[in-house]
Image: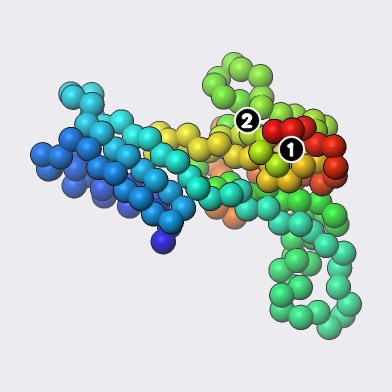
Amino acid sequence: MELTPDDVRDVLRVLDSSGLEELHLELADLTLTVRRAGGAGWTAEQHVRRAPRVEQAAAPAAAAEPPAAAGTAAAAAEVGEGLVAVHPPLLGTFYRAPQPGAPPFVDAGDRVGAETVVGIVETMKMMTPVHAGVPGTVVEFRVGDGEFAAADSVLLVVRPGAGGAPG
C-alpha cells in the first residue's frame, strides 16, 4: 500500500478532531510518526524504507522483443543505453541542496556511490533523501531544483561504473 499526500491530509484532519497526542503509522515501506506540538499544530517524522527506483537501460533488443524487454527498451530510449535513471521515492518537490543557498549535494560529473544522497524530495513538509542507487558518475539532472517530481519522473541519470564515491 502506498501512502498518498491526500491520505496524510485525511489522517491529520482526523487527528485534529481527536484528543490524540501522537500517531505512529507503520507500513511495509514507510514509518510515519505525527505528534501534536501544542498550539503550533503537528510535527511529523518519517522514514522511507524504500530503495530509490533505478532503471538500467540496456541495448535495444531484436525486432521480436518479449514484453519484459519492452520496458527495458523504453528505459533505454528515455535515458540512453547503459545509463541508469534515478526516480524519486515519493512524489513531491525535488531539491538539489539541503537548504536554500547551500551548495548542491552533487553536480553533473560527480562520482557517487549507491548510498550517496543526490537530492531530497519534500512531500507534505517532510523531507525524504534521494540516494543514487548505483555507484557511478552523474551524467545530468532531468528535474530542476525546486521543481515538482512525479513518482515516475527521472530525477537524474547516472553512468554506472566501479569507483564511485563511497556514499
Visible in this render: residue 139? no
Question: In x, y percent, where is residue 146?
Answer: 56, 32
Which residue lies most toward the bottom here?
Answer: 64
**Residue pictured at 82% horizontal, 46% vertical:** 160
- In what element is the residue under mark 1? loop
Q: Quadrant of residue 75?
A: bottom right
- Pointer 1 or 2: first along the chain: 2
Of badges 1 and 2, nearer the viewer stands 1
Q: Quadrant of residue 116?
A: top right
Amino acid type of disc 1?
A: Gly
**Residue pictured at 41% horizontal, 39% vertical:** 46
Question: In x, y percent, where is residue 1?
Answer: 41, 61
> Is 71 placed left or right of 120 in the picture?
right
Visible in this render: residue 16? yes
Q: Nearer the viewer, residue 106 or 116?
A: 116
Residue bearing mark 2: 96
Residue bearing mark 1: 113
Amino acid type of disc 2?
A: Arg
Examine the rendered structure and indicate whether residue 1 appears above or below residue 44. Answer: below
Q: Quadrant of residue 117?
A: top right
Examine the rendered structure and indicate whether residue 6 appears above or below residue 114. Answer: below
